[in-house]
Amino acid sequence: SIPLTFFGGIGAASRRGILVKGGNYLEALNDVRYVVFDKTGTLTEGVFEVVHVHAEKSFTKEQVLYYAAYAEQHSNHPIAESVKKAYNGKVNEGLITSYSEKAGHGIEAVVDEEQVLAGNEKLMNLYSISYSRASEYGTIIYVAVNNRYAGYLVISDKIKQDAKEALKSLKRLGIKKTMMLTGDQKSVGENVGKQLGIDEVYAELLPQHKVEKVEELDKAKEKAEKLIFVGDGLNDTPVLARADVGVAMGGLGSDAAIEAADIVIMTDEPSKIAEAISLAKRTRKIVW
Ligand code: ADP
Ligand code: MG
């Protein structure tokens, strides 16, 4: 049974925008030694912006953006939202006759009877497209039309304002190791990790690889030590379920993630993790 005071702790947390789904999770926060983060939408705003378009010789920039925007039309991934926003033209949805979203890769669609691919290097490799790797810094979305490489978009995202302080606070609270798992490119993941002082960064991961990483860490740590995973939702549900405590961002997060999570941060601020741990520690003191 849960000591009554935990309900006081849960109430105090909820007044700070931290929804804790049970006293056992508040209790578990006391023993957290490992904090694993998703990147996009968790440590970064998850609001991308197209900053540059590159077209190969037989294409124009307008065409590259047109194909990408049509391919991304039915996706609500943060990347897709930025591409739709950058495209100014009207979209005739009737032209999109087929569409499929490949987790951790991108999109394959049929637009006006042409096959369009929009996604990362993994997607290009999956379809054996010969492309030249972009040397610009940013998240790169390659575009291919009828298996011909057409160009790429460079998109960028901003680190959340409180993210750096959030990581510092965790160290002060005795967290042994922080980790970031992302499906984004290595260069982008490592840059964000370095700016925030995250101990370990793993990039270019598919959703199932994120689960495997958490399982690995779970086996390596001592039993009494708890591991929490913090994610925004898109594709994060299996990892949220696998961690000792799954934390979801409630504002940006998908409904499925909010459902799968044990704790929901309504303000989307990563600094709330440290706040929740401090609160759990104070609550325990009152209980014992
Ligand atoms: P994260 O781990 O950062 O939350 P995801 O697993 O959602 O990222 O996506 C990983 C990568 O897969 C993205 O960085 C992008 O390269 C590619 N990707 C995913 N969805 C899309 C999309 N709708 N359009 C283009 N690329 C995508
Ligand atoms: Mg994600």
Image (cartoon, rainbow, N blue to C red):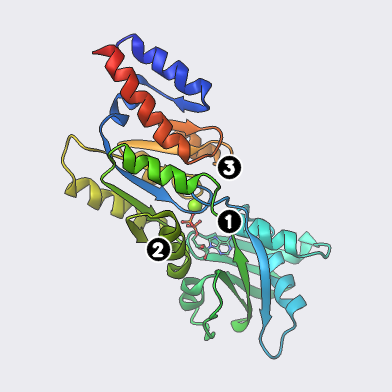
What residue sits 71% from the left and 90% below the top? 58
Please report whichever mark, 2 or 1, sits nearer to the chain's N-terminal start.
Answer: 1
* Residue 111 image position (x, y, % from top left): 71, 70
For label 1, the residue is: 158
Residue 174 sits in which quadrant? top left
* Residue 184 image position (x, y, % from top left): 47, 63
For label 2, the residue is: 203
* Residue 56 image position (x, y, % from top left): 66, 86
Mark 3 vs 2: CB contact within 8 A: no
Which element type, helix, strand or loop, lies under badge 1?
A: loop
User: Which quadrant of the figure contains the N terminus?
Assistant: top left
Q: Between tags 2 and 1, which lies in front?
A: 1
User: Is residue 2 visible from the viewing direction of this image?
Assistant: no
Residue 168 in the image: above or below residue 24: below
Mark 3–mark 2 Cα distance, whole angstroms, equals 21 Å
Q: Between tags 3 and 1, which lies in front?
A: 1
Which element type, helix, strand or loop, lies under badge 2?
A: loop
Which element type, helix, strand or loop, lies under badge 3?
A: loop
Whether the residue under disc 3 has CB within 8 Å of ligand 2 = no
Mark 3–mark 1 Cα distance, whole angstroms, equals 15 Å
Q: Amino acid at mark 1?
A: Lys
